[in-house]
Structure formats: C-alpha cells, structure tokens
Amino acid sequence: MATSRAERRLTAVLVADVVGYSRLMERDETGTLRRLKALRKAQVEPLLAEYRGRIVKLMGDGALCEFASVVDAVECAVRIQQAAIEHEAAVPEIERIAFRIGVNLGDVLVDDEDLYGDGVNVAARLQMLASPGGVVISGTAYDQVRGELQRDFTDMGEQRVKNLDRPIRAYQAARAGQQIDRPLPATGALSVVHGPSIVVLAFQNMSADPEQDYFADGIAEDIITDLAKLAGLFVIARNSAFAYKGRDVDLRQVARELGVRHVLEGSVRRAGNRVRVTAQLIDGATGGHVWAERYDRELGDIFGLQDELTREIVNALSLRLTRDEKRRLEHRGTASVEAHDFYLRGRDQLWLHTRSGVQAAVAALSRAVELDPSFAAAHAMLGMAYNLFYINSWNMDPELAQRRASDFAERATELDPLEPLGHFVRGVVRMWAHELETARESATLALELAPNFPPGLASLGLIHLYAGDAAQSVDLFERAIRLDPGYSNTFLHFLAQACFQLGRYDEAASQLRQRLVLSPESDASRMLLAATLGHLGQLELAHEVWQNLIAVNPAFSLEQRRRILPFRDPADFERIVTGLRKAGLGPVLDDSCIPKA
C-alpha cells in the first residue's frame, strides 16, 4: 500500500479563532453554531475563494488556511474581519461572533494535505496576540506586504509567546479607514512624560481556579486607583494597562508604547484563606529591576498587603506626598474582606458596559452593600450601574433607574467624602439629570481627589460640552486619552461630538467611523454620523448610515435622544436635527421619530 510522502514548502498560513467560543456555546449552543456556519458560508468561504486560499482544516471554533501569496492572505484576513463585523452588527454584543486572526509566512510540512511545523505554530501564536476583530502578522509576512497593500500597520515589537523559544516580531494590521486597534497608540509609541510615571499591568492569576481572575485583576486595579490619587505621579489607566493581559510582552516595549518610565507587574495565588502576591517594579528604559517583593498573607490581611505595596512603589519612585495625599492613601473603604470581594466582582462586570454585565454588577454590588452598609465605593458603583440602565433604556422604568442612581451616588458622598468614585458618579448622575452646575462641582472635586482618573476627566469634558463649551471639552478628552492611550472607544464618540459642535465636521466624521468599526452597535454614533454627513453634503452616505442605524435599533427614537441628552442650549441638539434634515431625512424624522405637534 502506497504511503504519501511529506514535503516542505514556503507558504502563507492563516489561523483564525472565535473569541469566547465556550462562553457563546454555553449561552446559546444552537444559535451560535447556526450563525457561525452562516458566517462561514456567506462571507468566509467566498473571500477565501476570491483570494485563492484553501481551508486546510476546521477546528470547531477556528480554522487553519493556506495561501500561495502572503499579500492575498493578509488582505483576505482583513476582509474577513470586516465582513464578520457587518454580519454580526444586529446581534446583541454579548452574543456576537468575533475572530482573532494571525498570518505568517513560513516553512511548513505538508502531509496528506494537512500542514505542520514552525510556520503553523507561529501563525497560531500570532492569532493569540490579536484583539477581537483584529489581525496580527509576522515580521516575515510584513516584509513582503508593506508597500503592496494600502493599509496601515503598527509595529508591536518582539513578542515572547508560549512554546516558542525565540521572540516573534509582530505587526498589527488596520482595516481601511481604521485607527490601529489599541493597546498600541496610533503613532506606535508615545513620548515619555516629564516626571515620575508608571503603568500597573494586570496581575497574573496563578491560582488553580481561572475564575479567580477577577481577584488578581482587582488587586492590580486597586493599586492603580490608589496611585491615581497622587498629583505628582502619571498613572496609565486600567483600560490601557489591562490590554496587555495574557500576552508575553517585552516590558521595555510596553513602557515605550505607553510613554512611561516604570512598569509594575505581578502575580496572585489564592488558595483557601491564604494569598501570595509577588510584584516587581521595572525600569522601562533598561528592563532592570528597581524593586521586587513577595508577600504571603492571610486573606484577611489583603488590605494591609495592598497598602504596603503602594508604599513600596511610592518609596521606590522617591515621591514626596502632601499631607492630604498621605491621608487618602491610608484611607480604606471597607474592613470587610467579603464585601470587598463582591465589590471586585461587581466592578469587573460593570466595566463591560453590557446589559448582562451591568445586571451581574448590580447583584454583586448589592451584596457588597448588604455586607457593609458603609462601603461608599460600592454605593457609588451601584449608582453608576443604575445610571447606565437609565441612559441606555435597559428594561427598567427610566424614572426609577434615575432615582436609584441618584440615591446611591448621594449616599456614597455622604458615607465617605474622601472617596473620589462617589463624587465622580454623583457628577455623572447630576449631568444626566440636566443639573450641569452641580455636576461640574462634583466632577471637579473627584479630580481633586484623583487627578489621574481618565473617566473623571472625560465626564468633566462632557459636562463642559453639554454646557456649551465644546473647546474646553476637547482639551479634557485629550488629557483623558493621554492617560489612557488604549482608551475606551466611547472617548472617540465624545471627541466627535465636541468637534461636531465646533463645526469641525470632517474630524467628527473620521472619529465616528473609527468608533463604529470598534463598536458597530452604537446607534448614538450612527445618528451623529448621519447628521455630520448631512452637514458635509454627503447625502447618499448619510441615508446608508441611517438605514444601518434602524437595522441596529429598530426602536430608535430621536425624540428620546432629545429628551435625554442634557444640552443647556436646545440649539445644540437642533444642530443634529438640522444635519439630518440637510441629508434629506426630514420625512423619516417627521413620520417616525419626532411626534407632530
């Protein structure tokens, strides 16, 4: 019986994987499989045929593909991501199918039409470095495609990945018209800020239980929160710091990308009533250790451990603290380990900004408040959760949601005037209640207590925007983005809204397009983009954007947006309506969105 003979060849390898496949299957196995099959048949397979690629094998939640041309492989990968975003746009975010894709040009072993070897392994590791909806390619692939494709690439530097004994040079590919997916800033690196600066990376969960991730993340985030209270220290925000989670990165590269002098990394192992935390402070220029320590403690001493960690960082950076800063660092919101644990769980879910995440956050934070009724930060985060229910109209009476948001925010500031979260949330809640002056006072106080808090800067920027000072809001948004280079894509919408109010329509349109690539379900961004295109005279595009808005949210109401957006001057909202009418959408507005008098 004849046996096939293995051969070696140089080929382009594409590896794709579905993000969160197990979670999707647990939520809706039948629906996920049906939509994944439809996506492959309607989008992926035709694109593979167009770019002369072949599926080597399907692996349940992923695929291994081969191309004769690496240029075709990279272009096909980016087109697949675009198609997947469009295909899933109408699906609720938590159920949406998204891919990570890696592409490599390398030597492979071919045996019975299957591929093996280093070229495949590298592509698989690159796939793991990609963000959801993103494409990461190897240095060998980049050398062949640069100049051949009209796309931007960002150098991610040399990446150390699992099961490979050498670093891989990696590059991130952008879709057409897209700013490079973060954590990398669009410029590839930021200039180092003057004075002490630091990024605290997500601590690695070394526990046997992967469900303890929230606990390891919570310790790192608590350190960030404490350091953000120090005016003399520049602290990268959680969102940007945690973007490196799970990646084997060169810490010097991280420091260069974020423009900071120091990097803190660590690990957490929790077993029963014991916890072990290791931490090391790294010089971002040399990669050398500034300070390192290991702590073995009872779980009940977790607050003392965090205080000690923060003091060590302050001492290592030779920071001189004011009396008020010392007092704020010594201040702890709760003495209950159990309440703090539920707070970490709730905060972790709240930052997802999804309906299900916020619902889970309310349950966990409510339990934290039950365990410690004096826990101000838990009250504040509950206020933020209910405020999200209010502004998103999520299955709750708006008046009830707003009243609960207000009650929890006010209670937080009463319980602990030194807790910046309380003043921050009170400012946000008062802003959405159209009480802009009170909101400004609270937001300003929050920033006095935590100067390095990007959401606080962004909220003060929004307050200025709605009060009619869009120019001031742009400055605040840009300061927030510098602290959070991997900024939440909502910042793009805020910047676009400010540029729109200033009549800078080209800038607004560009920012809104970028935002919709990252968050295609945003009906607010689609509304503003349609109005912006109307002012620019791009009527056909405006109609297309509006049709997509209705597809995303058939129940969209412009009148609801008029009611909820807290513009002090009604003429500022009318600028949006005018843009939509200029786009020729007047009959649609009159018939569907604005009740006739």
Image (tube, helix red, strand yellow):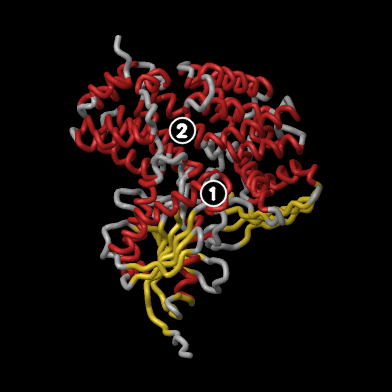
Does residue 529 appear left or right of residue 476 in this picture? left
Q: Which quarter shows the C terminus?
A: top left
In front of the other: 250 or 71: 71
Instruction: Give the amino acid type for the residue marked by disc 1 in the picture.
Output: Glu
* Element on which disc 1 rests: helix
Whether residue 23 is visible, yes or no, is: yes
Q: Nearer the viewer, mark 1 or mark 2?
A: 1
In front of the other: 344 or 582: 582
**Gap in Å between the C-alphas at discs 1 and 2?**
39 Å
Whether residue 198 is visible, yes or no, is: no
Mark with earlier residue (1, 2): 1
Residue extending farthest bottom: 1
Does residue 257 appear left or right of residue 303 in this picture? left
In front of the other: 280 or 182: 182
Residue 269 x/y as whole percent: 72, 54
Question: What residue is at 52 percent from the left and 47 percent from the top?
Answer: 195
Does residue 301 appear left or right of residue 466 in this picture? right
Residue 366 x/y as whole percent: 67, 29
Residue 291 x/y as whole percent: 66, 57
Which mark, residue 224? none
Sort mark 2 into few (<14), some (14-19) or many (20+) by Cα contacts within 10 Å.
Answer: many
Instruction: Give the amino acid type for the residue marked by disc 2 in the picture.
Output: Ala
Does residue 141 appear left or right of residue 451 in this picture? left
Q: Is residue 389 above or below residue 26?
A: above
Question: What residue is at 67 percent from the left and 49 percent from the top?
Answer: 211
Which mark, residue 458? 2
Q: Is residue 174 above or below residue 110?
A: above
Q: Which residue is mark 1?
A: 29
Q: Is residue 224 above or below residue 336?
A: below
Quarter holding residue 412: top right
Q: Is residue 591 above or below residue 361?
A: above
